[in-house]
Amino acid sequence: MTTDLTLSEKYLLLCYHPEKGRLLHTANYYNYGLAGALMLELAERGICKIENNKLVLTDNKAIGDKALDLVIARIARADRPKKPSSWISTISQAVLGVKIKQAVRESLIQKRILSTREKTALLIFKYNRYPARNTRPRRQIIQDIQNLVIKRQIGNNETMLLIALLGATKMTKSFFLPEDRKVANKRINEITRNNAFAKVVDSTVTAVQAAVLGAIIATTVVTASTTSAN
Protein backbone atom coordinates (compact mmCIF):
# COMPACT_ATOMS: atom_id res chain seq x y z
CA MET A 1 0.00 0.00 0.00
CA THR A 2 2.71 2.51 0.93
CA THR A 3 4.46 1.85 -2.40
CA ASP A 4 1.45 3.49 -4.08
CA LEU A 5 2.15 6.78 -2.29
CA THR A 6 4.51 9.50 -3.47
CA LEU A 7 7.10 11.13 -1.23
CA SER A 8 4.95 14.25 -0.85
CA GLU A 9 1.89 12.15 0.00
CA LYS A 10 3.80 10.23 2.66
CA TYR A 11 5.17 13.43 4.16
CA LEU A 12 1.77 15.15 4.32
CA LEU A 13 0.14 12.00 5.70
CA LEU A 14 2.61 12.01 8.58
CA CYS A 15 1.76 15.64 9.30
CA TYR A 16 -1.88 14.83 10.13
CA HIS A 17 -3.14 13.28 13.34
CA PRO A 18 -4.74 9.99 12.22
CA GLU A 19 -7.81 10.28 14.48
CA LYS A 20 -8.30 14.02 14.96
CA GLY A 21 -7.59 14.87 11.33
CA ARG A 22 -5.70 18.08 12.11
CA LEU A 23 -2.04 18.91 11.69
CA LEU A 24 0.28 17.66 14.42
CA HIS A 25 1.61 20.23 16.87
CA THR A 26 5.11 19.55 15.49
CA ALA A 27 4.04 20.27 11.90
CA ASN A 28 4.51 24.04 12.16
CA TYR A 29 6.81 24.04 9.12
CA TYR A 30 5.15 21.35 7.06
CA ASN A 31 4.63 23.73 4.12
CA TYR A 32 8.41 23.93 3.64
CA GLY A 33 8.76 20.17 4.01
CA LEU A 34 6.05 19.58 1.43
CA ALA A 35 7.77 21.94 -1.00
CA GLY A 36 11.03 20.08 -0.39
CA ALA A 37 9.37 16.71 -0.98
CA LEU A 38 8.04 17.87 -4.35
CA MET A 39 11.47 19.16 -5.39
CA LEU A 40 13.03 15.84 -4.44
CA GLU A 41 10.38 14.01 -6.47
CA LEU A 42 11.29 16.13 -9.49
CA ALA A 43 14.97 15.31 -8.94
CA GLU A 44 14.24 11.57 -8.66
CA ARG A 45 12.35 11.73 -11.94
CA GLY A 46 15.23 13.58 -13.59
CA ILE A 47 13.08 16.66 -14.19
CA CYS A 48 15.34 19.02 -12.25
CA LYS A 49 18.98 19.19 -11.17
CA ILE A 50 21.36 21.48 -9.33
CA GLU A 51 23.87 23.44 -11.41
CA ASN A 52 26.09 26.13 -9.85
CA ASN A 53 23.92 26.03 -6.72
CA LYS A 54 20.84 26.85 -8.82
CA LEU A 55 17.86 24.61 -9.57
CA VAL A 56 17.41 23.94 -13.27
CA LEU A 57 14.54 22.18 -15.04
CA THR A 58 15.55 19.57 -17.60
CA ASP A 59 11.97 19.21 -18.85
CA ASN A 60 9.04 21.61 -18.39
CA LYS A 61 6.25 19.41 -19.74
CA ALA A 62 3.32 18.46 -17.49
CA ILE A 63 3.52 14.87 -16.21
CA GLY A 64 -0.05 14.29 -15.00
CA ASP A 65 0.58 14.75 -11.27
CA LYS A 66 -1.37 17.85 -10.20
CA ALA A 67 0.97 18.97 -7.41
CA LEU A 68 4.15 18.38 -9.41
CA ASP A 69 2.67 20.05 -12.48
CA LEU A 70 1.95 23.17 -10.41
CA VAL A 71 5.60 23.25 -9.32
CA ILE A 72 6.95 22.59 -12.82
CA ALA A 73 4.78 25.32 -14.33
CA ARG A 74 5.88 27.85 -11.71
CA ILE A 75 9.59 27.09 -12.12
CA ALA A 76 9.28 27.14 -15.91
CA ARG A 77 7.87 30.70 -15.77
CA ALA A 78 10.93 32.06 -13.97
CA ASP A 79 13.10 34.44 -15.98
CA ARG A 80 16.31 33.00 -14.54
CA PRO A 81 17.52 30.01 -12.46
CA LYS A 82 17.19 30.40 -8.69
CA LYS A 83 18.64 28.75 -5.63
CA PRO A 84 16.70 25.85 -4.08
CA SER A 85 16.06 28.00 -0.99
CA SER A 86 14.31 30.59 -3.15
CA TRP A 87 12.07 27.94 -4.69
CA ILE A 88 11.26 26.40 -1.32
CA SER A 89 9.96 29.79 -0.17
CA THR A 90 8.05 30.41 -3.40
CA ILE A 91 6.45 26.97 -3.58
CA SER A 92 5.41 26.92 0.09
CA GLN A 93 3.82 30.34 0.38
CA ALA A 94 0.54 32.08 -0.46
CA VAL A 95 -1.86 30.85 -3.15
CA LEU A 96 0.51 28.36 -4.77
CA GLY A 97 1.28 26.68 -1.44
CA VAL A 98 -2.42 26.27 -0.69
CA LYS A 99 -3.11 24.79 -4.14
CA ILE A 100 -0.25 22.33 -3.78
CA LYS A 101 -1.36 21.20 -0.32
CA GLN A 102 -4.91 20.71 -1.59
CA ALA A 103 -3.67 18.70 -4.57
CA VAL A 104 -1.61 16.32 -2.41
CA ARG A 105 -4.38 15.99 0.16
CA GLU A 106 -7.01 15.33 -2.53
CA SER A 107 -4.81 12.57 -3.91
CA LEU A 108 -4.67 10.93 -0.46
CA ILE A 109 -8.46 11.18 -0.25
CA GLN A 110 -8.88 9.65 -3.71
CA LYS A 111 -6.60 6.80 -2.68
CA ARG A 112 -8.86 6.30 0.35
CA ILE A 113 -6.07 6.99 2.83
CA LEU A 114 -7.60 10.18 4.26
CA SER A 115 -11.25 11.14 4.66
CA THR A 116 -12.99 14.51 4.97
CA ARG A 117 -15.15 15.58 7.90
CA GLU A 118 -16.86 18.95 8.06
CA LYS A 119 -16.83 20.71 11.42
CA THR A 120 -18.56 23.84 12.68
CA ALA A 121 -17.17 26.42 15.09
CA LEU A 122 -19.38 28.87 17.00
CA LEU A 123 -22.38 27.46 15.11
CA ILE A 124 -21.34 29.49 12.05
CA PHE A 125 -17.83 28.84 10.76
CA LYS A 126 -17.34 25.62 8.84
CA TYR A 127 -13.99 23.90 8.36
CA ASN A 128 -12.70 20.47 7.44
CA ARG A 129 -10.73 17.84 9.27
CA TYR A 130 -8.92 14.99 7.51
CA PRO A 131 -8.76 11.86 9.69
CA ALA A 132 -7.29 8.66 8.31
CA ARG A 133 -9.69 6.35 6.51
CA ASN A 134 -7.00 3.69 6.46
CA THR A 135 -4.36 3.94 9.22
CA ARG A 136 -2.18 1.06 8.02
CA PRO A 137 -0.09 3.05 5.50
CA ARG A 138 0.80 5.68 8.11
CA ARG A 139 1.73 3.05 10.68
CA GLN A 140 3.88 1.24 8.13
CA ILE A 141 5.70 4.43 7.14
CA ILE A 142 6.48 5.21 10.78
CA GLN A 143 7.66 1.64 11.35
CA ASP A 144 9.94 1.86 8.30
CA ILE A 145 11.39 5.13 9.61
CA GLN A 146 12.04 3.73 13.07
CA ASN A 147 13.55 0.52 11.67
CA LEU A 148 15.97 2.45 9.48
CA VAL A 149 16.95 5.08 12.06
CA ILE A 150 16.96 3.21 15.38
CA LYS A 151 17.42 -0.41 14.36
CA ARG A 152 19.68 0.49 11.42
CA GLN A 153 17.85 -1.85 9.10
CA ILE A 154 18.20 -1.40 5.36
CA GLY A 155 15.61 1.02 4.00
CA ASN A 156 14.61 2.21 0.56
CA ASN A 157 15.63 5.55 -0.93
CA GLU A 158 12.22 7.17 -0.39
CA THR A 159 12.26 6.37 3.33
CA MET A 160 15.68 8.02 3.61
CA LEU A 161 14.43 11.13 1.82
CA LEU A 162 11.38 11.25 4.07
CA ILE A 163 13.56 11.01 7.17
CA ALA A 164 15.70 13.92 5.94
CA LEU A 165 12.60 16.08 5.45
CA LEU A 166 11.21 15.23 8.89
CA GLY A 167 14.53 16.21 10.42
CA ALA A 168 14.70 19.49 8.49
CA THR A 169 11.19 20.49 9.60
CA LYS A 170 11.78 19.56 13.24
CA MET A 171 9.16 16.81 13.35
CA THR A 172 11.28 13.91 14.62
CA LYS A 173 9.95 14.05 18.17
CA SER A 174 6.53 12.97 16.90
CA PHE A 175 7.98 9.66 15.73
CA PHE A 176 10.73 8.80 18.22
CA LEU A 177 10.70 8.25 21.97
CA PRO A 178 12.49 10.91 24.08
CA GLU A 179 15.34 8.52 24.88
CA ASP A 180 15.87 7.80 21.17
CA ARG A 181 15.83 11.36 19.82
CA LYS A 182 19.52 12.18 20.25
CA VAL A 183 20.54 9.02 18.42
CA ALA A 184 17.82 9.59 15.83
CA ASN A 185 19.01 13.11 15.01
CA LYS A 186 22.60 11.92 14.58
CA ARG A 187 21.49 9.04 12.39
CA ILE A 188 19.29 11.33 10.28
CA ASN A 189 22.30 13.53 9.50
CA GLU A 190 24.24 10.45 8.40
CA ILE A 191 21.41 9.28 6.18
CA THR A 192 21.14 12.67 4.49
CA ARG A 193 24.88 12.86 3.75
CA ASN A 194 25.12 9.33 2.38
CA ASN A 195 22.00 9.37 0.20
CA ALA A 196 22.41 8.52 -3.48
CA PHE A 197 20.90 11.90 -4.35
CA ALA A 198 23.24 13.58 -1.86
CA LYS A 199 23.78 16.81 -3.82
CA VAL A 200 20.10 17.45 -4.45
CA VAL A 201 19.09 16.20 -1.01
CA ASP A 202 21.65 18.38 0.73
CA SER A 203 20.62 21.45 -1.27
CA THR A 204 16.94 20.78 -0.70
CA VAL A 205 17.18 19.95 2.99
CA THR A 206 19.46 22.94 3.58
CA ALA A 207 16.89 25.11 1.80
CA VAL A 208 14.09 23.70 3.97
CA GLN A 209 16.15 24.27 7.10
CA ALA A 210 16.87 27.87 6.02
CA ALA A 211 13.16 28.48 5.43
CA VAL A 212 12.28 27.04 8.83
CA LEU A 213 14.95 29.16 10.53
CA GLY A 214 13.68 32.25 8.74
CA ALA A 215 10.14 31.53 9.93
CA ILE A 216 11.34 31.09 13.52
CA ILE A 217 13.29 34.36 13.42
CA ALA A 218 10.36 36.24 11.90
CA THR A 219 8.01 34.93 14.58
CA THR A 220 10.48 35.85 17.31
CA VAL A 221 10.89 39.40 15.98
CA VAL A 222 7.14 39.93 15.74
CA THR A 223 6.61 38.57 19.25
CA ALA A 224 9.38 40.74 20.64
CA SER A 225 7.98 43.83 18.91
CA THR A 226 4.49 43.13 20.24
CA THR A 227 5.80 42.61 23.75
CA SER A 228 7.80 45.86 23.61
CA ALA A 229 4.78 47.78 22.35
CA ASN A 230 2.76 46.56 25.31
Image (cartoon, grey):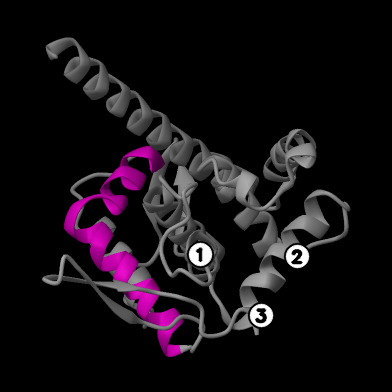
- Type of the residue with mark 1: His
Q: Quadrant of the C terminus?
A: top left
Q: Badge 3 is on which residue? A: 136
Characterize the local packing of mark 1: few (<14), some (14-19) or many (20 or more) Cα atoms within 10 angstroms.
Answer: some
- Percent across and percent down for residue 178 are 73, 39
Of residue 121 and residue 162, the one placed in the foreground of this image is 121
Residue 54 is a magenta residue: no
- Percent across and percent down for residue 217 are 34, 24
Q: Quadrant of the N terminus?
A: bottom right
Characterize the local packing of mark 3: few (<14), some (14-19) or many (20 or more) Cα atoms within 10 angstroms.
Answer: few
Structural distance between the alpha carbons of marks 1 and 3: 13 Å
For marks 2 and 3 on the same chain, the one whose residue lies earlier in the sequence: 3
Per the rendered image, the range of residues in magenta is 83-110
Give the answer, above or below, for where 167 lies relative to 98. Answer: above
Residue 17 is tagged as: 1
Q: Badge 2 is on which residue? A: 143
From the image, state whether disc 1 or disc 3 is nearer to you: 1
Which SS class for mark 1?
Answer: loop
Structural distance between the alpha carbons of marks 2 and 3: 10 Å
- Type of the residue with mark 2: Gln
Residue plotted at (50% across, 43% down): 169
Residue at the front extreme? 123
